[in-house]
Image (cartoon, helix red, strand yellow):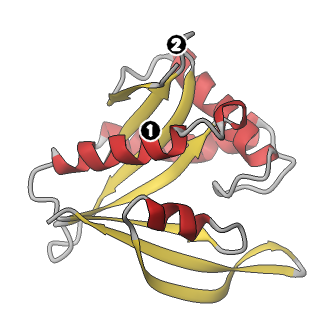
Amino acid sequence: MALTFQLDPPLTPDLRDGILGLWADVSNAGGAVGFVAPVAPEAIRPELVKHMVGMAEGRQRLLVGFDAAGAPAATAFFSFNTHRLMTHWVWLYTVMVHPAHQGKGYGRDLMKAAEEAARGFDGIDAVRLTCRGGLGLEHFYAACGYKEVGRVPGAIRVAPDDHRDDITMLLSLT
């Protein structure tokens, strides 16, 4: 069964807790979403609160993919630029699909839903995201239409002896 995507769903306590659980599960399965395993939802909460503040201020928007039971199974956050010379593109952050749903094409579905949502934002010509090197994520995003436009070698330290490239990807909407 496919996921049902919703842009800007009401942020209820259940959804908030579901996103925290999703984020922890993805991180603990080795996902590159800002944390290194092992991590508990409470350690992630401050980062989610930052996203929630951005949403309340109109600087960010949330896309959620719900599974058949109505639980969040995938997310992506859009972040709008405040610099007047960069308001024509958005960032895409915290792109994740629950490990139990990986391998079903839901990642591509999430990226397609994100593209469709971005096309509906006034004045937006492109979507940018960054990904952690060493996992092949840039190949996944390339298959979704993104082009690599920058790479900083060793910019991400996941452990004292494990440095990864920070890769910037761009999807043109024009």
Between residues 17 and 132, which one lies in front from this camera angle?
Answer: 132
| Mark 1, secondary structure of its residue | helix
Q: Which residue is mark 2?
A: 70
Q: Amino acid at mark 1?
A: Met
Q: Count the labels in the image.
A: 2
| Residue 174, numbered label | none
Q: What residue lies at 16% left-to-right and 66% top-to-bottom?
A: 88
- The image position of residue 74, as x and y in percent, is 53, 35
**Residue 70 point in image, percent of width and height:** 52, 13
Image position of 150 (left or right of 82): right
Residue furthest top in the image: 69
The residue sitting at 36% across, 71% down in the picture is 170
Work out whether 37 lies above or below 63. below
Of all residues, the one furthest to the left in this rendering is: 123
- Residue beneath the point at 61% across and 24% down: 18
**Quick check: 40 left or right of 113?**
right
Visible in this render: residue 91?
yes
Residue position marked by numbered label 1 in the rendering: 52
Where is residue 153 shown, x and y percent of the image? 64, 90
> Which amino acid does the dot numbered 2 rest on?
Gly
In the displayed structure, 148 sits above or below 74; it is below
Which residue is at the front of the view, 46 or 124? 124
Secondary structure type for disc 2: loop
Question: Is residue 58 something one can see in this rendering?
Answer: no
Which of the 4 image quarters holds residue 124?
bottom left
Asked if the residue under mark 2 is in contact with the one under mark 1, i.e. CB atoms within 8 Å, the reply is no
**How crowded is the residue under tag 2: few (<14 C-alpha within 10 Å), some, or many (20+)?**
few
Q: Which residue is at 54% across, 40% downward? A: 105
Q: CA distance from mark 1 to mark 2?
A: 20 Å
